[in-house]
Image (cartoon, rainbow, N blue to C red):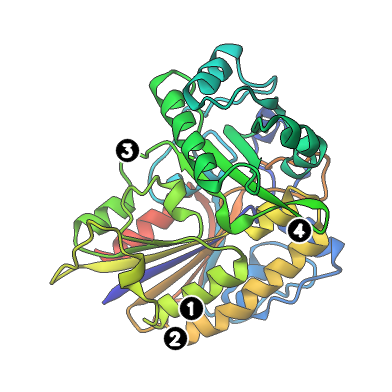
Amino acid sequence: MKRAIVMVIDSMGIGAMSDCQEFNDIPECNTLKHVCEFNNGLNVPNMQKIGLGNIQDFKGIEKEPAPIGQYGTMLEKSKGKDTTTGHWEMAGLISPKPFSTYPHGFPPELIDEFVKETNCGSVLANRPASGTAIIAELNEEHHRTKYPIVYTSADSVFQIAVDTDLIPLQTLYNWCEIAREILDKGDWNVSRVIARPYKIIDGKPTRISKDRRDYSMVPSHTILNDIKNSGGKVIAIGKIEDIFSKSGITHAIHTGSNREGLELTLKAVKNELDLESIAYPDYKEAKTTTGNLIFTNLVDTDMLYGHRNDPKGYGKAIEEIDTYVDDIIENMTNEDLLIITADHGCDPTVEGTDHTREKVPVLVYSKNIKPKNLGVINGFDYVAKIIKEHIF
């Protein structure tokens, strides 16, 4: 059975796109390079073997004289620097029109409709903010009023934060679903509604990653739909299910950390994942199929370290990911294709806490691959192209 395994190291960009200033970014941003420099080099021997250090000069990641895979740099065609546009383009869907952003908060008519439809009373904040900062700032008022904290960022996101010991988690999810419906029926063009649950732990408001949910716009058609329609399995690990609004997915499991996502990916590669327990209700196993896809998003680099300007933590997260690459490769069959890439940047060393408009690395490995330098590739949809060539 042919399989493609795609691992997205969320936000591990490798240098500013030529149009970065249109997205309020500086030409100097380079997430991986700056994380390497801050940490005086990174220990990533397995991605180094595939050819990561051959793409450009990264401190501590050596150039491999005899790489075992293919390596290159992908440029984004879509107009964005966010999770949705990056992943959709990897899956073959270009977004020529940028999603809308709301640098001054959401218009009163949108908020009024949200309050009316959810019966939440009112909202707090309604402005761009760092999630951890806005929760810390407004936690006491949230507890006093029970109003949800609604905020956005430089990305196209409508984020709702609540303490789930105060407001039930299912209520938060319901409010997010209502927000998604309101946004979709209007001309708001907002990419994602994000549920941001938190709890007070050791006296500090702390976000609960495993309970986060993203409610994205529904993509028109991607390589995921092609695989599902051909009878194949599309196993979504992490927030992949949310990014694609379940479109083209057959099996899904959310994760609370990169380590959990990596363990699940390894289990999927080894055919040890309990697929029956994570299958969609409408999934019926096909007697014949062309191939399957394992699609993993590793979000800690972005959520815990990029947005929080923590290059030390970012570096450790990349090193942790690398420790699983050799086990994944070792358990691959001759029919498997591994792709390691990223969806945008989030340089933790530059001013601000938002995503950065960056190029991304792509590493490609199979047991029968001919190693080569792929150079500069126009479009993240190169990933969809090689998946299609491999599976179909």
Q: Residue at x 46, y 39 (%)?
A: 216
Q: CA distance from mark 4 to mark 1?
A: 27 Å
Counting residues from the start of the chain, the first of labels 2 and 4 encountered is: 4
Q: Which numbered tag is attached to residue 220? A: 3
Q: CA distance from mark 3 to mark 2?
A: 34 Å
> Taking the image as drawn, is residue 35 in sight?
yes
Please tell me how crowded label 4 is: few (under 14), some (14-19), or many (20+) other residues with Cα within 10 Å.
Answer: many
Pointer 4: what residue? 33
Q: Is residue 285 above or below residue 34?
A: below
The answer to whether the residue labelled 4 contacts the one labelled 1, judged by CB atoms less than 8 Å apart, is no
In which quadrant will I find the C terminus? bottom left
Residue in front for this viewpoint, 377 or 31: 31
x, y percent for residue 121: 60, 23
Q: Residue at x 39, y 42 (%)?
A: 93
In which quadrant will I find the N terminus? bottom left
Residue in front for this viewpoint, 334 or 368: 334
Q: CA distance from mark 4 to mark 3?
A: 35 Å
Counting residues from the start of the chain, the first of labels 2 and 1 encountered is: 1
Q: Which numbered tag is attached to residue 331? A: 2
Q: Secondary structure at mark 4?
A: helix
> Taking the image as drawn, is residue 369 in sight?
no
Q: Residue at x 41, y 83 (%)?
A: 270
The answer to whether the residue labelled 2 contacts the one labelled 1, judged by CB atoms less than 8 Å apart, is yes
Q: CA distance from mark 2 to mark 1?
A: 8 Å
Q: CA distance from mark 2 to mark 4?
A: 30 Å
